[in-house]
């Protein structure tokens, strides 16, 4: 056994001179790691769900639309039929088929939905039901009736809040009024293209997403019916939305589409570009979480510093003896750092066990936050109130590394203090 | 190779402690030669400078003036690291309160300095076991200090100091916390080792038994040597007239 091993042995045994103190300290640091893992797991899980829900209730992971639509929001900006055909053909290629889970062309407009009791402004979404079901959450959130079918063109599905306001039920008739879309640059004749149009529809299903803005405003109807109503040629849509197998592929798919559609007056956007506010909110949430975790770690770190420093100060005499016997300052420092690292190792084991256990529970059973939102979720929030924890191996390694580094850095000061034990002051009786 | 004439030599050593503006002289011009193999004791009332003298000889403290030579080396010229090396290789310490490392067994405590010297395990074990057998510690190897009596702990401390075969052992009131029978037994052990190995022993003590057993008694008063009397055998008779070899 070399002297280094002796120092490790002394460090390890020193830890157990006061087992209760050691375990409490280890528990404090372990709790810090556990909190870090739990909060990161819920944060990542929450974000993953929020992104998944956000894109499935909105423009998908990637959206292709007419150039300028993102900024202007003008419903009159439509994708030409040939562009839509090009996109669909491109997405059928081998590489794309691997990463794209669903594709849905949509025609968007605004209108007024009238029932016998009331009227409300609505966001019209014309879809191909079969395609929309591969992308959107709406078909899965039907609480009454059924989602649209490809063969019934005069059906409509509406949000639960809208149904309540219009006092309609499954089978009720509603009249959708809107203005036909005038294409930019298209010739108008006697106001043609700006005519008011209306159509009679039957409510086939009512959905509830839990998101006020969707439940109170959105309606979906078959694409041919929407195109006829809005005076749009068959094949023309506002956007083509893509749902991917993996969110992280969004930039690559968007880039590939941009390349494929180079020269066409279109924009291919990732969800971060098409939903910038959601992206910013998640970014802010991340930043806030990092700050909170920093505060937790700083508090735990100060506790550890205090404990190790107290241990060192209590053993000043012992360090004096070691130094008198010939132990060099560097070896004393190594002894203290070794002790601190051994404590950290125990803490990390406790923290990992605790953190991963709680993570597993939240990953399988979820953290139900519905009691927080009894009155409904805020209108702008795309948020599933049951959070499922998600932790990647990278996150775990990162968290363990951060805590390990913190504990190591913290141990330098007590180690320096031990190394600087002054002789003969430390040996009062010699 | 130059062999020192003296195991320890002090020339007009002065040391004062300062507390704020107050200066308390601890040693006031001490000159002293101690030959290799001596079994010497320093005695004197509290504050007479015994502790300071041992600290300075052991390289734990530095004087304000004067020269200290230990094992042929001028301590004034050594850095802190070199002093640590000297202590590890050439000097053994026995403290009043034993000061064994509580987390190590008796055997591990005794091995401690050998480990720091990098002595191989087998040789280490042989040396410690031989010494334990000589000083009556056989069978107690695996006990922690808390499981040993005061006398046993002090014997382990002596073993720790002796096991590296140092040139000099400094013992600060080694019998202060022992009953008289245990103190006598410990003195027997140390005197035996002194005779057997020729190691120089310097004690500081208040204990009349230690003074009686010392072969040389140096009395200090107010930081100066009040008397210096030879009290019998000098283990290795090195006199001032002996020349360097």
Image: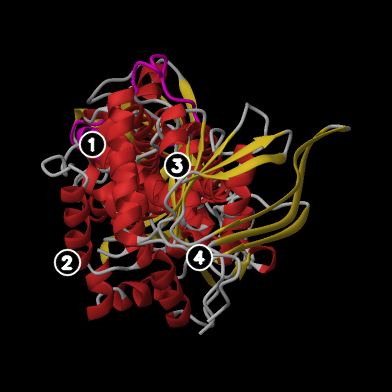
In this figure, which colouring scheme has been used for the structure? Answer: secondary structure
> Label 4, label 1: how many angstroms apart (C-alpha)?
40 Å
Residue at 25% across / 75% down in the picture? A92
Q: Which mark is residue B238?
A: 4
Badge 4 or badge 2: first in the primary sequence: 2
Give the number of the mark in front: 3 or 1.
3
Tell me the residue at 31%/52% (across/down). B193
**What distance separates the C-alpha of mark 3 from that of mark 2?**
35 Å
Question: Residue A256, position in %: x, y?
Answer: 41, 77
Lower position in the chain sequence, tag 3 or tag 4: 3
Q: Is residue A141 above or below residue A273?
A: above
CA gap, disc 3 and disc 4: 17 Å
- Closer to the camera in the image, A22 or A35: A22
Closest to the observer, A130 or A210? A210
- Residue under label 3, please give it: B214
Alpha carbons under labels 1 and 2: distance apart: 21 Å
Q: Residue B122: which disc? A: 2
Q: Is residue A180 above or below residue A371?
A: below
Q: In front of the other: label 3 or label 2? A: 3
Q: Is residue A23 left or right of residue A239?
A: left
Q: Earlier in the sequence, mark 4 or mark 1?
A: 1
Give the x, y percent position of residue A286. Answer: 50, 44
């Amino acid at each position: 056994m070399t002297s280094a091993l002796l120092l490790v042995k002394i460090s390890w045994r020193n830890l157990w001179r006061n087992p209760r103190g050691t375990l409490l300290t280890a528990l404090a640091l372990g709790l810090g790691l556990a909190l870090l893992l739990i909060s990161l797991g819920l944060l990542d899980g929450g974000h993953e769900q929020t992104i998944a829900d956000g894109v499935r209730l909105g423009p998908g992971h990637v959206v292709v639309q007419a150039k300028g639509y993102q900024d202007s929001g003008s419903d009159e900006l439509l994708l030409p039929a040939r562009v839509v055909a090009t996109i669909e053909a491109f997405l059928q290629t081998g590489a794309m088929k691997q990463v794209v889970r669903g594709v849905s062309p949509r025609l968007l407009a605004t209108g007024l939905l009238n029932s016998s009791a009331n009227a409300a402004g609505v966001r019209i979404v014309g879809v191909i039901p079969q395609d929309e079901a591969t992308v959107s959450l709406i078909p899965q959130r039907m609480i009454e009736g059924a989602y649209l079918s490809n063969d019934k063109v005069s059906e409509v599905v509406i949000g639960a809040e809208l149904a309540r306001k219009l006092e309609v039920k499954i089978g009720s008739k509603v009249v959708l009024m809107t203005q036909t879309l005038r294409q930019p640059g298209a010739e108008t004749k006697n106001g043609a293209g700006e005519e008011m149009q209306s159509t009679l529809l039957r409510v086939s299903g009512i959905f509830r997403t839990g998101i006020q803005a969707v439940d109170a405003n959105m309606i979906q109807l078959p694409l041919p019916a929407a195109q006829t109503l809005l005076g749009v040629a068959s094949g023309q849509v506002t956007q083509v939305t893509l749902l991917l197998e993996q969110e992280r592929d969004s930039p690559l798919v968007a880039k590939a589409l941009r390349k494929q559609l180079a020269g066409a007056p279109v924009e291919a956007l990732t969800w971060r570009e098409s939903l910038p506010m959601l992206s910013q909110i998640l970014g802010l949430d991340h930043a806030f979480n990092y700050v909170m975790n920093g505060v937790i770690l700083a508090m735990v770190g100060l506790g550890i510093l205090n404990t190790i420093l107290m241990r060192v100060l209590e053993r000043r005499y012992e360090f004096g003896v070691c130094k008198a016997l010939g132990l060099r300052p560097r070896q004393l420092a190594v002894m203290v750092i070794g002790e601190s690292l051994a404590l950290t190792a125990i803490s990390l084991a406790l923290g990992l066990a605790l953190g991963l256990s709680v993570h597993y529970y939240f990953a399988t059973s979820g953290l139900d936050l519905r009691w927080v939102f009894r009155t409904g979720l805020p209108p702008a929030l795309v948020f599933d109130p049951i959070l499922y924890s998600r932790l990647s191996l990278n996150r775990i390694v990162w968290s363990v590394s951060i805590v390990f580094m913190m504990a190591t850095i913290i141990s330098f000061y007590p180690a320096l203090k031990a190394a600087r034990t002054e002789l003969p002051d430390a040996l009062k009786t010699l | 190779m130059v062999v020192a004439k003296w195991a320890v030599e002090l020339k007009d050593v002065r040391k004062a402690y300062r507390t704020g503006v107050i200066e308390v002289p601890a040693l006031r011009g001490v000159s002293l030669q101690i030959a290799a193999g001596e079994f010497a004791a320093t005695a004197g009332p509290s504050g007479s400078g015994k502790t300071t003298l041992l600290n300075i000889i052991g390289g734990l403290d530095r004087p304000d003036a004067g020269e200290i030579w230990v094992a042929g080396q001028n301590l004034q010229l050594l850095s802190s690291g070199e002093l640590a090396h000297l202590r590890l290789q050439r000097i053994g310490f026995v403290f009043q309160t034993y000061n064994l490392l509580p987390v190590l067994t008796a055997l591990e405590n005794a091995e401690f300095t050998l480990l720091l010297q990098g002595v191989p395990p087998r040789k280490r074990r042989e040396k410690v076991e031989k010494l334990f057998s000589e000083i009556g510690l056989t069978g107690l190897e695996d006990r922690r200090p808390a499981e040993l009596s005061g006398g046993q702990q002090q014997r382990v401390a002596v073993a720790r100091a002796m096991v590296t075969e140092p040139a000099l052992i400094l013992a600060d009131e080694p019998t202060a916390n022992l009953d008289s029978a245990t103190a006598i037994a410990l003195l027997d052990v140390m005197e035996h080792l002194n005779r057997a190995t020729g190691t120089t022993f310097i004690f500081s003590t208040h204990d009349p038994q230690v003074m009686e057993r010392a072969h040389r008694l140096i009395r200090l008063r107010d930081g100066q040597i009040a008397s210096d009397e030879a009290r019998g055998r000098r283990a290795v008779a090195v006199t001032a007239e002996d020349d360097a070899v």
